[in-house]
Image (cartoon, rainbow, N blue to C red):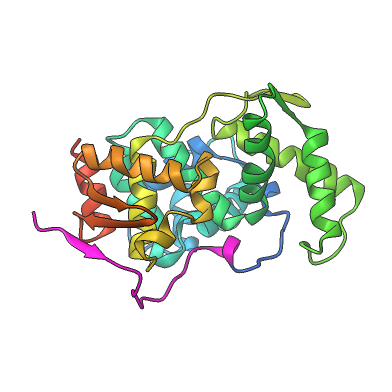
Amino acid sequence: MRLHFSGEARLSPISLGPEVTGAIYTTQLQAGLGLVAETKALLDLWVPGMSTGELQEVARQSGSFPMITARRLRNIVTECFAPRYLVSGASPASHLKMLMASVPLADLMQLMLLFTSRANPILGDFVREIYWSRYAGGYQQVSNEEARAFVERAIDDGLTSKRWSDTTVRRVAGYLTGCCADYGLLEKGLRSNRRILPYRATTTASAYLAHDLHFKGLGDNALLTHQDWQLFGMAREDVINELKRLALKGHLIVQAAGDVVRIGWKHRSMEALCDDISKG
């Protein structure tokens, strides 16, 4: 298959999620944390072109959520699923649905972390700034108190539209650690100190993120330092090494000379990539 190379002169418009646009932190995670099982169930029901309201009604009638009230289901669909997966022309939902039947749950969870962090900048920054600093420092746990201190600093830095009450700060801190547990970064369970779990980007997640940033308009060298990689604990050199591993699997070609990196892209679209991944 013919490869196409891209350089730094790409002029496509870039839309990389709210975390790079100075978005204000919100309490939206209170509507639902990782919601892994619920997301999979909703993806089963969702079809391209379906509106949020239509998905909510189909989900209500499906019998797939027997223990969830209609109000709670509405909140899950409108406050969690839609902002995470029905953005950018619903491409996240479309891609996850393509991959869901053929890739391991761990791969899906990492993509869910990516999309949830883009929709909720407070989560992405917590993972980058607190989780990985603790991980790199050799610590064994992340506590709700550390999450609370992170939230309080964010408020002091003006990252919320108004000051939150102590109760809200405490709850949001719990949402952050709970969401990390749902996505496999921390141990599960109702606890104020959670054990840090081994965490590394899967091949599927790395391939998806690299191509996603490419098709959103980033040049090859800019792609290497995008903050989404930091969700998986990767700096520039780590990303280069990860791309070389992807090259061994045939997803792309990497040419590195000093500080200049050029990438040959095998797939012409995200859909082509997802199709290739789903076929193994």
Give the quadrant of residue 192: top right
* Quadrant of the image containing the N terminus: bottom left
**Which residue is at 78% across, 45% downward?**
150
Q: Answer whether residue 45 is visible to the viewer in this image.
A: yes
Q: How many marks?
A: 0
Q: Is-magenta flag for residue 119?
A: no
Left or right, residue 134 beside residue 159: left
Residue at 86% x, 56% y is 164
Residue range highlighted in magenta: 1-20
User: Where residue 235 sits: x, y (%)?
Assistant: 51, 45
Report the predominant secondary structure element of the magenta stretch.
Answer: loop
Q: Quadrant of residue 181?
A: top right
Left or right of 67? Residue 177 is right
Residue 77, how many percent across, how many down?
A: 54, 53
Q: Nearer the viewer, residue 277 or 260?
A: 260
Q: Position of residue 257 (x, y in %)?
A: 31, 53
Q: Position of residue 226 (x, y in %)?
A: 49, 56
User: Residue shown at 35%/70% (left/top)?
Assistant: 8
Image quadrant assignment for residue 21:
bottom right
The residue sitting at 27% across, 35% down in the picture is 102
Residue 2 falls within the magenta-colored stretch: yes
Farthest right residue?
166
